[in-house]
Image (cartoon, grey):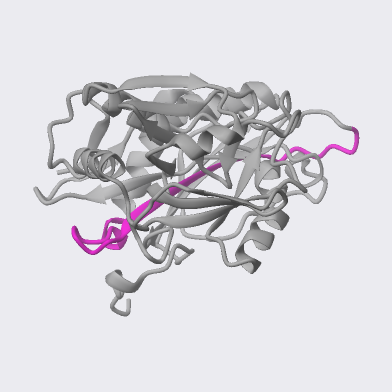
Amino acid sequence: MKEIDWANLSFGYMKTDYNVRCYYRDGKWGEIEVCSEETLNIHMAATCLHYGQEAFEGLKAYRCPDGKVRVFRMDENAKRLQSTCRGILMPELPTERFEEMVKKVVRLNERFIPPYESGATLYIRPLLIGTGAQVGVHPANEYLFVIFVTPVGPYFKGGFAANPYVIIREFDRSAPLGTGIYKVGGNYAASLKANKMAHDLGYSCEFYLDAKEKKYIDECGAANFFGIKNNTYVTPKSTSILPSITNKSLMQLAEDMGMTVERRQIPEEELATFEEAGACGTAAVISPIERIDDLENKKSYIISKDGKPGPVCTQLYHHLRNIQYGIEPDVHRWTTVVME
């Protein structure tokens, strides 16, 4: 294997040694299989291809300064996948099986786990697809669960830095009672056009308002939104937002820091009152928001006056990362050591 330039990795796919797979057939899950193939052999009438019967997750493994490798809150990823399965009628993978497969795939690909302080991590991608052939719109009778890994660099090239966002009204990421609360590929396909529009306009990401009234803050592209003011952490409550494990963790850390946490509807005009704001998710942890432009109404909500991350975002970011890397005490027992 040629030497990997850990410090200059992009957030993209790199071939690794192994993936792990598990098939659902005849009403039950089979044994865990180890595979070195990068491709899947599936029927052309598989439900994942025609009716979007697929779900995925995203989590990371961290090589820590104490030499151990840790994974962050994988039980929450298992629960979220189970929620998606209930939403689109796929068989639920038990949490124990999910965790066993995560540990196995990380250990099998140890040489691809980036060193501590390289700025890179090992991204873990679980994927569940309907493989049974169907022409009518029905759930499949067979499924494949696969987990692959790839070393990745920072999601945003600038790392932990304040970024500009733009409100896109022409498109909705998901409907209020649709699949927005599930991690299915269709939600991301629905965001591609708006995301391209934002990039073409020079912004780091698009910003969505609620699909029903176009009055309230919904999501930042593929990430949850939070705002900080008056020692309060405010994040949207909506029936179309994916429940972010990172956001859930940040809410707990904000409470630990003595802040009040509010989950509620946030009118667009309230953006003008936030002292700090950020987008949060597994890939970037926190992406602080410099400003949010509303081009249609010719408004610009300047959140970071000096264009830099604010003190609360900075504290939350480092606190969460230090827990993930085993530097600060893991009082909530969020991390799992998968390699000593």
The answer to which image quadrant residue 274 occupies is top left
Tell me: 319 left or right of 204: left
- Where 247 falls versus 287 (above or below)? above
Number of marks present in the image shown? 0
Towards the viewer: 83 or 99? 83
User: Residue drawn at (64%, 56%), measured in percent from left and top?
Assistant: 195
Residue 264 location (% of width, % of height): 52, 20
Q: Nearer the viewer, residue 291 or 40?
A: 291
Location of residue 81 in the rendering, given as x and y in whole percent from the top left corner: 53, 30
The magenta stretch spans residue 134: yes
Tell whether 236 sits left or right of 309: right
Instruction: Say which residue appears at 60% left-offset and 29% top-offset.
Output: 267
Q: Where is residue 149 in the image (x, y as percent from the top left)?
A: 42, 54
Residue at the far bottom in the pictured view:
2
Residue found 64% across the figure and 21% down from its top: 86
Query: In this rendering, does residue 34 appear at all?
Result: no
The residue located at (60%, 59%) in the rendering is 39
Q: Is residue 200 shown in magenta? A: no
- In the rendered structure, the answer to whether residue 52 lies left or right of residue 1 reads right
Q: In this view, does 135 lie to the left or right of 338?
A: right
Nearer to me, 96 or 126: 126
Q: Quadrant of residue 3?
A: bottom left
Which quadrant, please, contains the N terminus?
bottom left
Residue 142 visible in the displayed image: yes
What is the span of residues highlighted in magenta in the rendered image?
109-136
Q: Position of residue 259 (x, y in %)?
A: 28, 23
